[in-house]
Amino acid sequence: MGGQDKINQTTITTFILFGFAGYQELQLLLFLTFLVIYVITMAGNLLLIVLVAADLQLHSPMYFFLGNLSFLEICYTSTILPRMLSSLLTGDRSISVGGCLVQYYFFGSLASTECYLLAVMSYDRYLAICKPLHYSFLMNRRLCFSLIIASWVSGIVSNTIITCLELQLSFCGPREIEHFFCDMAPVVKLSCSYTHIVETVTFILASMDTIPPFLLTVISYVCILTNILQLQSRTMRKKAFSTCSSHLIVVTLFYGSLIIVYLIPKANSLKKLHQTFSLFYTVLTPMVNPLIYSLRNREVKKTSKLRALPAQDIVP
């Protein structure tokens, strides 16, 4: 990518993240807003993990996967928001090239893992609704752990390959990244090395990490909705749909924002739109996930209320 005409330029060691550079007068307000979001995200997901781990009523595959999703969201948002908060507070938007690639590695690994984990949760709901008599046998403890491990390993391996290829790139300038974190496309765009191999491998691995899980999720929900519509009782249809509605909302938010960010053409006029929807899947989705699940799941709400009561007020 223009490597020959930049070969004699000095290699740069830092990037400048220009994601919120155009909002100088709003820096303090943005800092406070994202700080509140980060606190809510951490508190909500930690509380959900504690509830799932502490209450025996929540020791089921669905809540096991939900606890893992909350842990992933904590790690996910922590790769981006602390650095963003520091930048908004101090005005220092610089980040080392190494630090930038490390941030992308963790962001990419966790985002890919979330794609697989959401697909696993969709499959779990499919078995629970479409094959209820065989659910306990099919979704056993061993399969649950295997699916979780496979999700994490798949996300980590693919992004390890991508990051190793990125480490071979040279950066000679410019060094301004028009984003609020180190995403793949804007970083590679600044390289003065030959980037075709990196971009091709990234496209292949990113497709493998998103398209199969997305298709599995869609197929699962097509089967679920078909099964629900065949139920005779309206009460049974409502109860069956309520068991997967929370996950369906989360999947829609996550994949909807991903599709808008990565499939809409990267025209200059759409840069602000890309950054806005990047906030959805990197910042807002991890915050609303525990709220959606806790508000729409009777077991979680019941457990939360019981733990808020004094011990003598809880009837065994």
Image: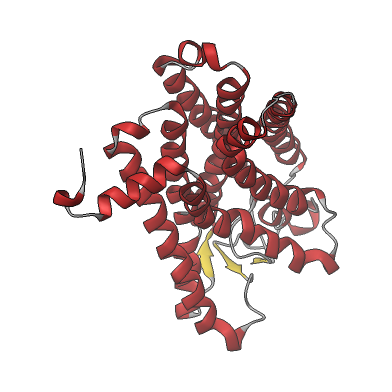
Query: Residue 176: image x %, image y %?
Result: 66, 68
Q: In the drawing, does residue 58 fall left or right of residue 151?
A: left
Residue 38's place in the image compared with 218, above or below, is: below
Above or below, comparing residue 149 to residue 81 in the picture:
above
Answer whether residue 164 is visible to the viewer in this image.
no
Tell me what residue is drawn at x 85 percent, y 69 percent: 269
Looking at the image, how many numbered discs can be counted on the residues?
Answer: 0
Viewer-proximal residue, 248 or 33? 248
Foreground residue among 67 and 242:
242
Would residue 142 be found to the left or right of residue 134 on screen? left
Q: Name the quadrant containing residue 49.
A: top left
Task: Name the spot of residue 158 as percent of width and height, x first.
Answer: 59, 32
Residue 136 versus residue 95 in the image, above or below: above
Residue positioned 76% across, 65% down in the render:
273
Q: Considering the image in quadrants, where does the C terminus appear? A: top left
Residue at horizontal 66 percent and vertical 50 percent from the top: 253
> Viewed as shown, does residue 8 lie left or right of 86?
right
Visual colour scheme: secondary structure
Q: Position of residue 196 (x, y in %)?
A: 77, 40
Direction from residue 54 to residue 181 in the image, left or right: right
Whether residue 275 can be seen here = yes
Q: Of 43 and 110, which appears nearest the observer?
A: 43
Looking at the image, is 275 positioned above or below residue 299? below
Considering every residue shown, the one lying at the far left of the view is 312
Q: Position of residue 247 (x, y in %)?
A: 58, 40
Could you say which quadrant of the image residue 230 lies in? top right
